[in-house]
Amino acid sequence: MLSTKHNIDMIDTGKKNKKKESIVKPKIIVDYNSGKAGIDLSDQLSSYSTAVGKSIRWYHKVATEILYGTAMVNALIVYNIINSDKKMKITQFRETLVDTILGLNNQGSQEVQQARVNSKHIFQETTEKCGRNRKIRKRCFHCYQSRTVIVGSKQASKEVKKITTFCAPCKSYTCISCFNLHHIG
């Protein structure tokens, strides 16, 4: 290792080997290990359930990992510091965050799951692929219909996002909010 800050000083790590002798390391190694520990933990936590999916462009993977992975770990650390009495694991934190963003609380999500079981409608993601080996995406039927009434079909086709989810028995593409509104309850 090269450093302009460190010299060749050896320091005692406070640990002992099998022969009960003190372990001595260069100061540069001890400083590196103490600084690297936080980064290693962050990388480990973000790798448990990564947001990075299959992508053609490598820089999409890097950006997604930095934005979502690191931000998620940092948010978890802040949450656990604030709520020290009820700490969460990273996967549980991600699920809770998604439920919160979708407007589902724990009780509501159980009700939605129960309604899906009792309902003849099934919310699924398509497995069909196009010629470019990507999932087929279509506009949400309900969003498109409501926007067409307001702005017309041409403008509605520009405004309504394409999705990969649909109701299997109805064979209509639908987003999660429209599925909950029109197919459940």
Image (cartoon, rainbow, N blue to C red):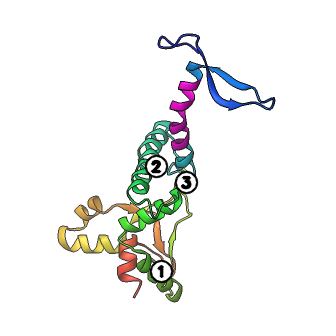
Q: Disc 3 versus disc 1: distance between alpha carbons?
A: 22 Å
Pick whichever of labels 3 and 2 is earlier in the sequence: 3
**Residue 35 magenta:** yes
At a point 27% along the width and 58% down the height, the residue shown is 158
**Residue type at tag 1:** Gln
Which residue is label 1 attached to? Answer: 110
Is residue 5 at least partly visible in the picture?
A: yes
Tell me, yes or no, whether the two marked residues, 3 and 2, touch with CB atoms within 8 Å: no
- Disc marking residue 73: 2
SS for dot 2: helix
Residue 58 location in percent, x, y?
Answer: 50, 37
**Residue type at tag 2:** Val
Q: Quadrant of the C terminus?
A: bottom left
Residue 38 location in percent, x, y?
Answer: 51, 38
Q: Quadrant of the N terminus?
A: top right
Q: Is residue 86 depicted above or below 69 in this figure?
A: below
Q: Disc 3 versus disc 2: distance between alpha carbons?
A: 11 Å
SS for dot 3: loop
Which residue is label 3 attached to? Answer: 49
Pick whichever of labels 3 and 1 is earlier in the sequence: 3
